[in-house]
Image (tube, grey):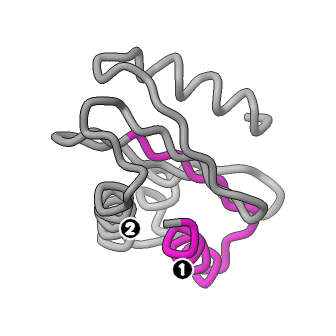
Amino acid sequence: MNKQIHAELEKIEAQGLKNVKLLALVSGTSYEVLFYADVDGKMCQSNDLAESGIISISFVEDLYETVANVVREDKKFDAAKMNIIKASDEKVTVEYDEKKCKIYSIKKKWKEGIGI
Protein backbone atom coordinates (compact mmCIF):
# COMPACT_ATOMS: atom_id res chain seq x y z
CA MET A 1 0.00 0.00 0.00
CA ASN A 2 2.79 2.45 0.85
CA LYS A 3 4.24 2.34 -2.67
CA GLN A 4 0.82 2.82 -4.24
CA ILE A 5 0.00 5.78 -1.96
CA HIS A 6 3.38 7.35 -2.73
CA ALA A 7 2.67 6.87 -6.45
CA GLU A 8 -0.53 8.89 -5.97
CA LEU A 9 1.43 11.61 -4.16
CA GLU A 10 3.82 11.71 -7.12
CA LYS A 11 0.86 12.21 -9.47
CA ILE A 12 -0.16 15.23 -7.38
CA GLU A 13 3.37 16.62 -7.45
CA ALA A 14 3.47 16.09 -11.23
CA GLN A 15 0.69 18.69 -11.36
CA GLY A 16 3.23 21.25 -10.14
CA LEU A 17 2.32 21.02 -6.47
CA LYS A 18 4.79 20.56 -3.61
CA ASN A 19 4.87 19.36 0.01
CA VAL A 20 1.77 17.18 -0.37
CA LYS A 21 0.04 15.91 2.79
CA LEU A 22 -2.79 13.42 2.32
CA LEU A 23 -5.46 12.08 4.67
CA ALA A 24 -7.76 9.19 3.81
CA LEU A 25 -10.60 7.99 6.02
CA VAL A 26 -11.82 4.69 4.60
CA SER A 27 -14.40 2.18 5.78
CA GLY A 28 -15.99 -0.71 3.95
CA THR A 29 -18.86 1.47 2.75
CA SER A 30 -17.52 5.03 2.58
CA TYR A 31 -14.43 7.13 2.20
CA GLU A 32 -13.22 10.66 2.51
CA VAL A 33 -9.87 11.65 1.05
CA LEU A 34 -8.27 15.07 0.99
CA PHE A 35 -4.86 16.56 0.60
CA TYR A 36 -3.06 19.83 1.07
CA ALA A 37 -0.27 21.03 -1.17
CA ASP A 38 2.01 24.03 -1.33
CA VAL A 39 1.07 26.53 -4.02
CA ASP A 40 3.33 29.58 -4.12
CA GLY A 41 4.21 29.22 -0.45
CA LYS A 42 0.63 28.68 0.75
CA MET A 43 -0.90 25.34 1.74
CA CYS A 44 -4.14 24.82 -0.17
CA GLN A 45 -6.76 22.10 0.20
CA SER A 46 -7.44 19.75 -2.73
CA ASN A 47 -11.04 20.79 -3.33
CA ASP A 48 -10.02 24.46 -3.33
CA LEU A 49 -7.30 23.67 -5.87
CA ALA A 50 -9.89 22.04 -8.13
CA GLU A 51 -12.43 24.83 -7.71
CA SER A 52 -9.81 27.44 -8.60
CA GLY A 53 -8.72 25.50 -11.70
CA ILE A 54 -5.18 24.70 -10.53
CA ILE A 55 -5.96 21.00 -10.95
CA SER A 56 -8.97 19.40 -12.61
CA ILE A 57 -11.94 18.16 -10.62
CA SER A 58 -11.77 14.82 -12.44
CA PHE A 59 -8.11 14.44 -11.40
CA VAL A 60 -9.08 14.99 -7.75
CA GLU A 61 -12.09 12.65 -7.89
CA ASP A 62 -10.07 9.89 -9.60
CA LEU A 63 -7.26 10.26 -7.06
CA TYR A 64 -9.69 10.03 -4.14
CA GLU A 65 -11.27 6.88 -5.54
CA THR A 66 -7.90 5.29 -6.32
CA VAL A 67 -6.61 5.94 -2.79
CA ALA A 68 -9.77 4.46 -1.24
CA ASN A 69 -9.48 1.35 -3.43
CA VAL A 70 -5.78 0.93 -2.58
CA VAL A 71 -6.61 1.06 1.12
CA ARG A 72 -9.49 -1.41 0.81
CA GLU A 73 -7.38 -3.88 -1.16
CA ASP A 74 -4.52 -3.87 1.36
CA LYS A 75 -4.10 -6.65 3.92
CA LYS A 76 -4.03 -4.02 6.71
CA PHE A 77 -7.57 -2.91 5.83
CA ASP A 78 -10.08 -3.55 8.63
CA ALA A 79 -13.68 -3.37 7.36
CA ALA A 80 -14.99 -3.21 10.93
CA LYS A 81 -13.07 0.02 11.64
CA MET A 82 -12.40 3.44 10.19
CA ASN A 83 -9.01 3.12 8.50
CA ILE A 84 -7.07 6.37 8.84
CA ILE A 85 -4.23 6.82 6.36
CA LYS A 86 -1.85 9.76 6.68
CA ALA A 87 0.69 10.24 3.94
CA SER A 88 3.46 12.64 3.02
CA ASP A 89 6.80 12.41 1.23
CA GLU A 90 8.36 11.04 4.40
CA LYS A 91 5.96 8.25 5.31
CA VAL A 92 2.58 6.57 5.21
CA THR A 93 0.90 5.67 8.50
CA VAL A 94 -2.18 3.58 9.19
CA GLU A 95 -4.37 4.05 12.26
CA TYR A 96 -7.80 2.74 13.20
CA ASP A 97 -10.80 4.18 14.99
CA GLU A 98 -14.38 3.13 15.57
CA LYS A 99 -16.44 2.98 12.40
CA LYS A 100 -18.76 5.73 13.69
CA CYS A 101 -15.93 7.97 14.88
CA LYS A 102 -16.01 11.75 14.71
CA ILE A 103 -14.42 12.47 11.35
CA TYR A 104 -14.32 16.22 11.96
CA SER A 105 -12.10 15.83 15.02
CA ILE A 106 -9.75 13.46 13.16
CA LYS A 107 -9.41 15.96 10.30
CA LYS A 108 -8.92 18.87 12.72
CA LYS A 109 -6.20 17.05 14.66
CA TRP A 110 -4.45 16.02 11.43
CA LYS A 111 -4.53 19.57 10.08
CA GLU A 112 -3.02 20.88 13.34
CA GLY A 113 -0.34 18.19 13.10
CA ILE A 114 0.72 19.38 9.65
CA GLY A 115 0.60 23.04 10.61
CA ILE A 116 -2.62 24.14 8.97
Q: Which residue is mark 1?
A: 11
Query: In the picture, residue 39 is in which quadrant?
Result: bottom right
Q: Residue at x 43, y 61 (%)?
A: 50
The earlier-in-sequence mark between 2 and 1 is: 1
Relative to 54, residue 107 above or below: above
Residue 19 among those drawn in magenta: yes
Left or right: 111 as drawn, with respect to 41: left
Q: Amino acid at mark 1?
A: Lys
Q: Nearer the viewer, residue 2 or 110?
A: 2
State which quadrant residue 73 falls in: bottom left
Distance in Å between CA atoms under marks 2 and 1:
9 Å
In the image: residue 64, left or right of residue 13: left
The residue drawn where x is 73% and y is 34% is 116
- Disc 2 designates what residue? 63
Q: Position of residue 102 (x, y in %)?
A: 41, 15
Q: Look at label 2 and name its amino acid.
A: Leu
Which residue range is magenta in the image?
2-25
